[in-house]
Amino acid sequence: MENKSIIITNDDGIASPGLRAAVEAVLDMGEITVLAPSNQQTGTGRALTGEMQSRLEPIDYRVNGKSINAYHCKCSPAMIVRHSFRTILRESRPDLLISGINYGENLGFNVTCSGTVGAALEAASYGIKSLAISKQTDMESHLSYSDQNWEASKHFLRKFSERVLENNMQPDVDVLKIDVPIDATPDTAWKITKLARCAYYYRKIEQPGIQTTLGDGKVAVKFDADSLDSNTDIYALAVGKIVSVTPLSLDMTSRIEPSDLKNVLNVDLNAVCNQTNLNP
């Protein structure tokens, strides 16, 4: 494999051990640049937020004795990707962007909340091949840098990074979302999955009311295993205990045929299309 340009980002912040593990996984695969938020940005999705006076700040970043070009900024993961593509990467786009390795799995309906996924989607909007990888952890580790065994996550990150770099993404595949079980090993099976049509996390509030604050209650995992499609990401990771690999698309258009909406909307689609000079 020829020398490639690889960007690595995350939503847990520049000091995250998961970010360092991602660098270790692909360290010898190309020229690595780290671009990460200055601090914790979990749950920011693809938000383009940050301190407007902030800029990319170089940081001394060494992995396995090798000095890595690294920058941080006080902003969301998607924002540092966008800002970097408009500045230091304006003339030279990377071959691959990796977002992660995230503390905590990103599954089902919750993926649109994920800063890890948001950064990958932002890169994909510029035509960059992108991976978003997360490791299942206990809930307390989602906002703290707990000790983790990253070996399985590093193994799968390298495996799919190699495959994506060597091959073109298929049409309508903009990001590969990878979720690794907490007790996975490099020998753990993996499966191509789809997003489960349900939430994975929920916040339990004992006595909700007008006085309830945003931080009240406790986040927990809740899903009905019996009703899950076995081809979904939640089922693969939480029930099957295998690695989930989910292709994601920037195109969020429903895959339903327009004609199928006729009865629901109670409208003559031909008439509407004629008015807008479009074909049904």
Image (spheres, rainbow, N blue to C red):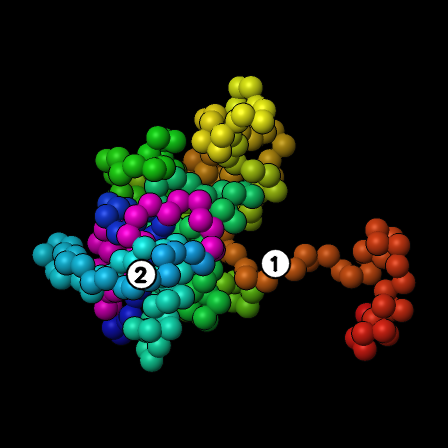
Quarter of the figure with residue 126: bottom left
Q: Looking at this view, is 176 or 62 the one in front?
A: 62
Q: Nearer the viewer, mark 2 or mark 1?
A: 2
User: In terms of depth relative to the viewer, which is nearer, 147 or 216?
Assistant: 216
- Residue 213 among those drawn in magenta: no
266 relative to 125, above or below? above
Amino acid type, mark 1? Met
| Residue 26 showing in the rendered view | no
Expressed as whole percent of the image width and height from the top left, the position of residue 95 reads 35, 70
Q: Image quadrant for the N terminus?
A: bottom left
Q: Which residues are magenta?
A: 19-47
Which residue corresponds to the image point at 86% horizontal and 64% vertical from the top-left?
A: 269
User: What's the amino acid at mark 2?
Assistant: Ser
Above-or-below relation of 208 to 111 = above
Dot placed on the residue nearer the N-terminal end, 2 or 1: 2
> In this rendering, is residue 123 above or below 76?
below
Q: Hey, which residue is sitting farthest bottom in the picture?
A: 91
x, y percent for residue 183: 34, 34
Q: Is residue 36 magenta?
A: yes
Q: Residue 102: where, in percent of width, then height?
A: 35, 46
Query: Looking at the image, which residue sits at the far left?
Result: 65
Q: Which residue is mark 2?
A: 54
Residue topped by disc 1? 252
Q: Position of residue 201 (x, y in %)?
A: 50, 34
